[in-house]
Amino acid sequence: GAGVSQTPSNKVTEKGKYVELRCDPISGHTALYWYRQSLGQGPEFLIYFQGTGAADDSGLPNDRFFAVRPEGSVSTLKIQRTERGDSAVYLCASSLTGSIQSPLHFGNGTRLTVT
Amino acid sequence: GEDVEQSLFLSVREGDSSVINCTYTDSSSTYLYWYKQEPGAGLQLLTYIFSNMDMKQDQRLTVLLNKKDKHLSLRIADTQTGDSAIYFCAEKDGSSNTGKLIFGQGTTLQVKP
């Protein structure tokens, strides 16, 4: 079946601009996660959705970052007033239930470059 | 807070066994994972182990868990050039009852023909 789909695969934007990154999880998966991976590092947690609600947003670095999942399926990560330090690969993952026993399945990520 | 540490690089010859090591700090971790990342791609779940197990085997992959020393290893038998990738160890965040993961920095495996 289809895996986690992320679009666009690459995004180049100028400093100060607004960007939106989209994630389409595996059908039927109630839990959705956003991670950020900087060059040479492991992924770092940003936010977790259970259904439509953000159950844990403790990883969002500041208030320029926001994410939504209005219908409990597709999610959008929004970054305002982008900075060069926001350049990274943004990974989305989904899991069937979000419980501790449910493994995460990752998409291929969106590579964001802020010039 | 929780931390996961891995060595950064491992080079082996094709056909040899590879052993990638990981240490973690959260003693309440219930599940530990190995993910593989090929260039330009996302993370592929390879295998995972529950903390009440000390070994799990899946075809060429063997996971060993030493809970006392908080040490996890991934052994790849008969390593192939297609195994060249970055391997990430991850633990469940023990402070959360969700699937939130904490990742290591990743070990780059280079397989020489």
Image (cartoon, rainbow, N blue to C red):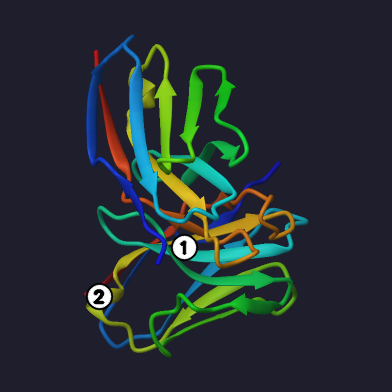
Q: Earlier in the sequence, mark 1 or mark 2?
A: 1
**Label 2, residues with CA under 10 Å away: few <14, some 14-19, many ≥20:** few
Do marks 1 and 2 share a subunit?
Answer: yes
Query: In what quadrant of the picture does the N terminus of chain A appear?
Result: top right
Task: Say if B44 sits above or below A67 in the image.
Answer: above
Query: Is disc 2 placed on a helix, strand or loop?
Result: helix
Query: Which chain contains the residue that carries disc 2?
Result: A
Task: Say if A67 sits above or below B73 in the image.
Answer: below
- Label 2 is placed on what type of residue? Gly
Q: Which residue is mark 2?
A: A85
Discs 1, 2 touching: Cβ within 8 Å: no
Name the residue located 64 percent from the left edge and 63 percent from the top edge: B98
The part of the image, by quadrant, that contains residue A16 is bottom left
What label does residue A8 carry, if any?
1
Q: Position of residue B78 (x, y in %)?
A: 39, 11
Give the spatial CA distance, label 1 vs label 2: 19 Å
Query: Is disc 1 placed on a helix, strand or loop?
Result: loop
Query: Which chain contains the residue that carries disc 1?
Result: A
Considering every residue shown, the one lying at the far front of the view is: B68
In the displayed structure image, the side of residue A13 where residue A77 appears, left or right: right
Question: B34 or B71, which is in the foreground?
Answer: B71
Q: Position of residue B113 (x, y in %)?
A: 24, 13
The part of the image, by quadrant, that contains residue A97 is bottom right
Question: B57 or A62, which is in the foreground?
Answer: B57
In the displayed structure image, the side of residue A70 where residue A79 appears, left or right: left
**Label 1, residues with CA under 10 Å away: few <14, some 14-19, many ≥20:** some
